[in-house]
Amino acid sequence: MWDLMLTGDYTPPRILEIANKEWGYRTLRRKKLGGQPLSRSGIYKIFSNPFYYGTFEYPEGSGNWYEGGHEAMITENEYDTVQIMLGRKGNPRSKKYNFAFRGPLFCEECGAMVTAEHKYKKQKNGKVRHYIYYHCTKRRGKCSQGSIEEKQLEKQIVALLNRIDIPHDFYEWAMDVLRKQNREEFGKRRGMLINLQKQYDACVKRIDGLIDMRANGEITEDEFSVKKLGLVGEKERLQRLINDNDNGIDDWIEKAERVFSFAEHAVERFQTGTPEDKRGILLSLGSNLTLKDRKLCVRLEKPLIFVEEAALEVRRISEMFEPLENRVGTAQIRGEYEKSSTLLRGSDSNRQPTR
């Protein structure tokens, strides 16, 4: 019955007729009641009951809604669509729609948050078109900004993701280069750590010696306080340098791998992901996510700025081999990557630890 209703080609009375006469539908038989054809009021009751998309109210009329353990026959969106067909808003539902981009986005004109809402348009043939629009809440005063449909917003996000999209062969090449640099960097940093540790140990000994001098009366209380303050500050500085360099040995390559992996799979994950996935991808792109004149503005995170430059260079290299790319081996493509000052400069700057 729900399938017929959702086509938009059948009215509830016509579905009732099909159910009773063609399908032999009968109500649940009880001791004294039931076993009768479905009534007109019964068909409307079915089409307005949230139970069919998986929720129920208990006790009835309490306003307390729960997710049932039964298998839903329809989705919540399909239920909402039928309510529009019936010309009503439908019964209260326990769940709220999870808009993908409500929360991260702000209006560039007035600074207020961007919200979202459903819009339904009933066509002449009875079918209902469903839209989601995003717009400024206008809670900070007068604002001239209009709304943008979610599909148009998603197109802009996909276009941005395409700018940082990298092929798998480049991902593998970049990680090989970074791992090689990591091995070289490890040796350099290990030497720095040994030197810093020696300085730290010497500083601790000087503090211990200073305490002994004060205990023996060799220096005054004021002299002790001044000298100790300087040595403790030096000790803390050396400790921070040790921690930063020790963590930096592996941190930078792990961060680079996360960034490159994100860039390689972001388009596919966005196009097939849940609203939560899409929101997470948008937030991963950068900060200052704003809308103005139906245009999305994103300030890319610094690592992704390099990835964007690298992706452009990789596309340039790929175009060099067209239309022969199917006959070009991985070694040839990697050879071009290694000649690129853009890619090598980016990989070198990327290995600098974040302070």
Image (spheres, helix red, strand yellow):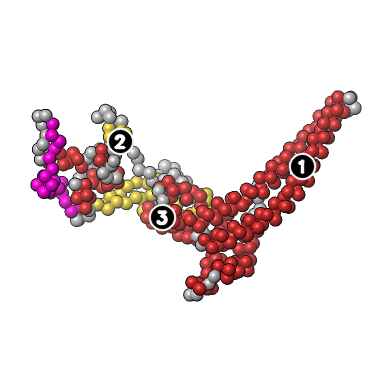
- Under mark 1, the amino acid is Gln
Check if residue 115 falls in the magenta segment. Answer: no
Give the spatial CA distance, label 1 vs label 2. 61 Å
- Under mark 2, the amino acid is Gly
Residue matched to label 1: 197
Which of the numbered marks, if any, corresponds to residue 68? 2
- Under mark 3, the amino acid is Gln
Look at the image and tell me whether residue 340 can be seen: no
Q: Is residue 180 above or below residue 191?
A: below
Q: Is residue 212 left or right of residue 163?
A: right
The span picked out in magenta is: 8-30
Judging depth in this view, the residue of 63 and 175 nearest the camera is 175
Residue matched to label 3: 271
Check if residue 29 falls in the magenta segment. Answer: yes
Q: Secondary structure at mark 3?
A: helix
Judging depth in this view, the residue of 263 and 282 nearest the camera is 263
Q: Residue at x 80, y 42 (%)?
A: 198
Q: Which comes before the other along the chain, label 3 or label 2?
A: 2
Residue 338 position, x and y percent, is 62, 66
